[in-house]
Amino acid sequence: MLLKNKRKRKIRKQRKYTFSISMRITAAFTILIVLLLIFIRLVFNMTVEALVYNNEYKTVETNYKLIKDFLTGDSIEGIEESHIKSNIVNEDIYVAIFHNGTPIFLSNKLFFTYYYEVKDYEDYISMSGKVNSERFGDIDLLVVSSFETEKMIIEFMENVLNVVDVIGILLAIIVGFYISRKMLSPIKEITSMTRDINIHQLNMRLAVDGPDDELRRLSITINEMLDRLEQSFEQQKRFVSDSSHELRTPITVIQGYIDLLARWGKKDEAVLDESIEAIRNETEGMKELIEKLLLLARYDNDTYQMEFGDVDMSQLLNAIVHETRLVDEEHPIIENIQAGHTILGDIKLLKQLLRIIMDNALKYTEDRNNIYVTLTGSEEFVNITIQDKGIGICEEDIPYIFDRFYRAESSRNKEKGGNGLGLSIAKSIVDRHSGEIKVNSIIGSGTEVIIQFKKQLDLIEARD
């Protein structure tokens, strides 16, 4: 109980700190938008600043050339402020002219006082050089441009972009959440539907409408899984029901003879002998049935440890024919067994397979009728055929003869015995060796069982 409560608390804790897929998609979409906005901001800042700087630099360069040409002209008799201003094409351009370090012209004294005192040249672009003037000789020319106005405009645009970024992020969250909910709505339907499916409602299936996308293929896969589960569950129910029925009959017989012994067996030796013999026969039948059921269960659970090795099917089939002749002298066996055909397999299971098929052929074939055993092979396959001239199987029954407890004719089974598990075990053995088994039969003419195995090389490659 304590472990169960701890497990529940752990699950709740995990749920508490686990984000839903919708939230993760929204977060991813938002992060993508934020990264895109950051990239746009960087590109904008770099581009605008470069354009502003280049534009101001060209303006300074143009004015510097104009003023320099003006100062070096032959027709210029002196330097006057009006002449300089008439050549300045931008109001934010400031000009200073020095002769031997003494300013002889300042277009804006207040500006240059601030310019030289602060010495913060990051907001200015300047160009300077010496000019040979006719009146003053060598003079120093300084042209300065301030782009504070442009910086204010850029800052305003950045503030606008900040607002746009915030709005964009909010929209990204809203749109991302909406899109994720829209995209994941089919998953919510799948979750709701699968939650309602239980062993009593295995016939429910998911809708597979809509475009051929991952979710549609997921629904198809889940439906196919449900088909297999339903089929397996129905087989399991039938298996349990048939097993109970098969075990109920001998138990009833045994109980009846025990009651008979309790009433009459203590004094009547004939009744005692009959009861002991009947109980022994029923017990042996139950033992055989239970062993087969356990074997099939091990096959189903894949817990049977197969011991693979090279099996000469020619020698194995000859051995089966030999032992069959020793225990049954009433059925002539005509064999045509080619030598030298080897497969990779479990010799115990293969021997059991051949015994099952041979036992069925003998059981349902009248005495003195032939049994034909053939083994042929090619480069790829080994083919085994066991054919009898017995009572045959109805065509409608052939598809079901490998089902557990299925008996084509109950009347002949009462007479001949059997519990309907032999062919099921044979089919399981063939499947575990990657082989194929096929039955052809005609009522009154006999039955032919064909078993085909791949050659050893193919099986080795498949196992590797």
Image (cartoon, rainbow, N blue to C red):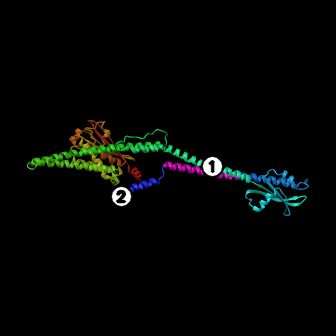
Q: Is residue 92 left or right of residue 365?
A: right
In this orientation, does residue 54 appear? yes
**Residue visible at 44% across and 54% down in the picture:** 14
Q: Amino acid at mark 1?
A: Val
Position of 339 with respect to 257 (left or right) is: right
Q: Compute the Cα span from label 1 to label 2.
A: 55 Å
Please report the bounds of the magenta region as a residue range: 21-49
Front-most of 23 and 451?
23
Q: Position of residue 111 (x, y in %)?
A: 79, 57
User: Quadrant location of residue 109?
Assistant: bottom right
Q: Which mark is residue 2?
A: 2
Is residue 367 among what the camera can see? no
Instruction: Name the mark on residue 163.
Output: 1
When the figure is inspected, residue 114 is found, relative to residue 296, above or below; the finding is below
Q: Which residue is located at x 32 percent, y 50 percent? A: 299
Residue 70, relative to residue 413: is it above or below?
below
Q: Dot 1: within a 10 Å radius of its alpha carbon, few (fewer than 14), some, or many (20 or more) residues?
A: few
The percent coordinates of residue 353 (x first, y second) are 30, 48
Query: In front: 85, or 320?
Result: 85
For image coordinates 89% across by 60% down, the residue present is 136
User: In front of the other: label 1 or label 2?
Assistant: 1
Q: Position of residue 420 (x, y in %)?
A: 27, 43
In percent of the image, x 41 and y 44: which residue is there?
A: 194
Q: Are marks 1 and 2 in contact (CB under 8 Å)?
A: no
The quadrant of the rendering that contains the N terminus is: bottom left
Q: Secondary structure at mark 1?
A: helix
